[in-house]
Image (spheres, rainbow, N blue to C red):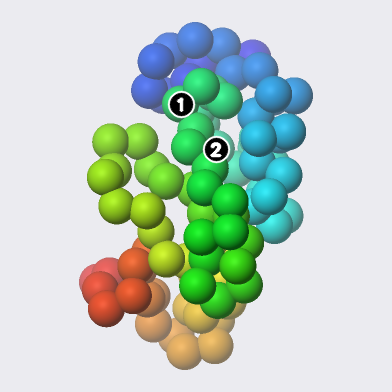
Amino acid sequence: MKPCQSCQTDIDEYLLDKQLEPLRELTADDFNICADCATIVADACVKCSGAVYVPRNESVTPDYCPACRSDLIDCTGHDPGWTRGHVST
């Protein structure tokens, strides 16, 4: 078991995978945090109405889920960032 990068507890991959189910195609292997430190918001993606992952210590809920953000990068070649109106560089 790997330790959580946030709180250093051992990551329970079963619990984290269950929590990440709403995020298309993501599993515990894609994260280095435990289920207690992961914040998932259902129905928040503006593109697919899927769940979004809110990074720890962030006060703003992202507009795009990781899958839609990746799709937009593939289609446009530009990173839209996590929220509309903000472009990552």
Q: Nearer the viewer, residue 5 or 63?
A: 63
Q: Nearer the viewer, residue 11 or 57?
A: 57
- CA distance separating discs 1 and 2: 11 Å
Local crowd at mark 2 within 10 Å, few (<14), some, or many (≥20)? some
The image's mark for residue 37 is 1
Residue 7, how many percent across, how many down? 39, 15
Pointer 2 residue: 31
Residue 26, how many percent across, how many down? 67, 49
Residue at left offset 28%, top offset 36%: 57
Position of 43 with respect to 81 (left or right) is right
Q: Nearer the viewer, residue 57 or 44?
A: 44
Residue at left offset 62%, top offset 72%: 48
Look at the numbered discs 1 and 2 and tell me whether their residues touch, using CB distance below 8 Å: no
Which element type, helix, strand or loop, lies under badge 2?
loop
Residue 22, how many percent across, how many down? 68, 50
Residue at left offset 72%, top offset 55%: 25
Residue 28, how many percent across, how many down? 65, 35
**Tag 1: amino acid:** Cys
The image quadrant of residue 20 is: top right
